[in-house]
Image: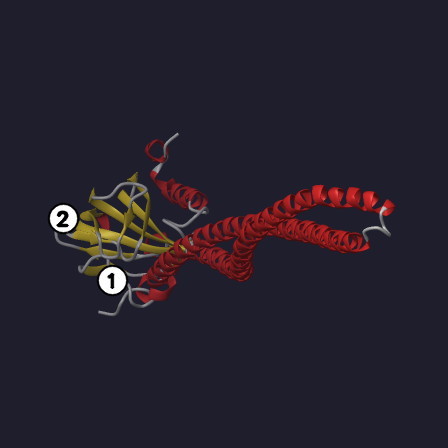
Amino acid sequence: MSLRFIASIWPEGKRICLWVIVWTALVFVSSGPVWGQDLETLQRQLWQKQEAKDEAEKEIASLTREERKAHTKLSSLEDSIQELEEEKRALQAEFENLQGTQKELQARISDLGKREAVIRTEIQDLLPRLWEVVLRAEVLKAKVFDSWPEADRSMVWLARLTDTASSKMQDLHRVQTDVREKERSLQAAKTNLEDKRKELSKLSKELTGKRLRFLEQVQVLRKKRQAAEKDLRALQARIQELQSELASKDRQAFSLHKGRLPWPAQGRVIVDYEPQKGRSNRGLGFSLPPDEEIKAVSWGEVVYNDKLRGFGQVIIIYHGHEYYSLYAFLSQSLVQKGQEVEQGAVIGRAGFYPQAQGPGMYFELRRKQAPVDPRSWLAKR
C-alpha cells in the first residue's frame, strides 16, 4: 500500500502520524550505505588497498631478492662454464699435439719397420754365409794340422759374421722394444685424453642443464615480479582514486558544512524554526515568487520524491550520516528518486504554500527523525 493512498484516506488531523511513518520508512531504507559510498566504506577500502599494497611491496622485494640470488648463481655457473670451455680448448690443443705426436710416432714406427726389414734382410744374407763357414770349419777340423792358416782365417771370419749377426739381432730387438713402448705410450695418452674429454663433456652437459634451469627460474621470477609490479601500480592508482574520492567525500561531508550551507531559496522567511510552538514550526517557511527555483543545500541522494497530503510535492534528500533535508509544497519536481544531486542543484520549483497564501516552500533539516535548527546550518545572510 503506497503512502499516497494512505494519505488520501486518513483524516487531516492524522497528517502528523503519516509524517512520522514517512520519516521512519526513510530512516529504515537509508540505514544501509550512504548515497554512493560513505566515508567509512571508502576509508575501509583505502585501508584494505594500502594493506594489499604493503603486501605487494613485500612480495616484490622478496621476488627481487630471489631473482638477484638466481642471477648470482647463474653468473657463477656461467663463470664455471667459461672455465670449462677454456679447459676444453686446452684439452683440444693437447689432443691436437698428441695427434701430431702420433703422426711423428707413426713415421718413426714406419722408419723402424723399414730398418727392421733391412736388418732382417741383412741377417738372412748372413745366414747362408754363416752356414758355409760352419761347413768349412767342419771340413777343416780334420785338416787342422795340415791347413792351420786357412782354418785360422775361417774361424776369424766365422767370429766376425757371428758378431755381425748378433749385433743385427740386438738392433732388431731394440727397434721392436722401442716400437712397442712408443705404441703403449701413445695408446695410454690417447686413452687418458679420451677419458678427460668424456669427463669434460659430462661436466659441460651438467653445467649447461643447471644454467638452463636457472635461466627458467630467473624468467619465472621476473614474470612474477613484473606481475606483482603491475598489481602494485594498479593498487597505487586505486589508492589515489580512493584518496581523491575520500577527499571529495570529506569536502562533501554534511557535518563539515554546518553554518556554511547555501539557502534552498532566497525568498522571505515567514515561518521560523520554533518547535515548541508546534509541528509546523520545525523548519523554515518561505514566501517566494511563482515557480522560484528550489536548490539542494548539499550533496546527497533523493530518497523520497512524491506527493504527500497536506505537504504537496515533497522531495527528501539523504546527505549521509543520518542527515536529511526536506523540501515541501513544490509545484514541480526536477529530480528522480535514487538520483544523486550536487550542492546547489535545482531540484524543483516553488508551489502553493498555505502559510504564505501564495507561492512558497517549506524546508526542514533532520538528523534521524529529529528536526534541527536550519539557521544554525545555513550560511548567514
Q: Answer whether labels 1 and 2 touch (C-beta < 8 Å).
A: no
Q: From what the image shows, is residue 157 above or below residue 72?
A: above
Q: Residue furthest top?
A: 1
Q: Is residue 305 visible?
A: yes
Number of numbered labels in the structure image: 2
Residue 25: image x %, image y %?
43, 42
Q: Is residue 77 visible?
A: no
Residue 112: image x %, image y %?
61, 50
Question: Around disc 1, counting alpha carbons within 10 Å, would you say few (fewer than 14), some (14 to 19), or many (20 or more)?
Answer: some
Residue 263: quarter of image? bottom left
Going by the numbered disc 1, the residue's amino acid type is Pro
Q: Dot 1 lies on which element?
A: loop
Residue 148: image x %, image y %?
82, 54
Q: Quadrant of the N terminus?
A: top left
Q: From what the image shows, is residue 234 above or below residue 333?
A: below
- Residue toward you, 78 or 88: 88
Q: Quadrant of the C terminus?
A: bottom left
Residue 83: quarter of image? bottom right
| Front position among marks 1 and 2 | 1
- Residue toward you, 365 or 268: 365
Q: Residue furthest left?
A: 290
Q: Residue at x 69, y 46 (%)?
A: 126
> Which residue in the structure is indicated by mark 2?
291
- Residue toward you, 165 or 250: 165
Q: Answer left or right for 61 relative to 302.
A: right
Q: Answer left or right for 139 relative to 284.
A: right
Going by the numbered disc 2, the residue's amino acid type is Asp
Q: Residue furthest front?
A: 146
> Which residue in the structure is indicated by mark 1?
262
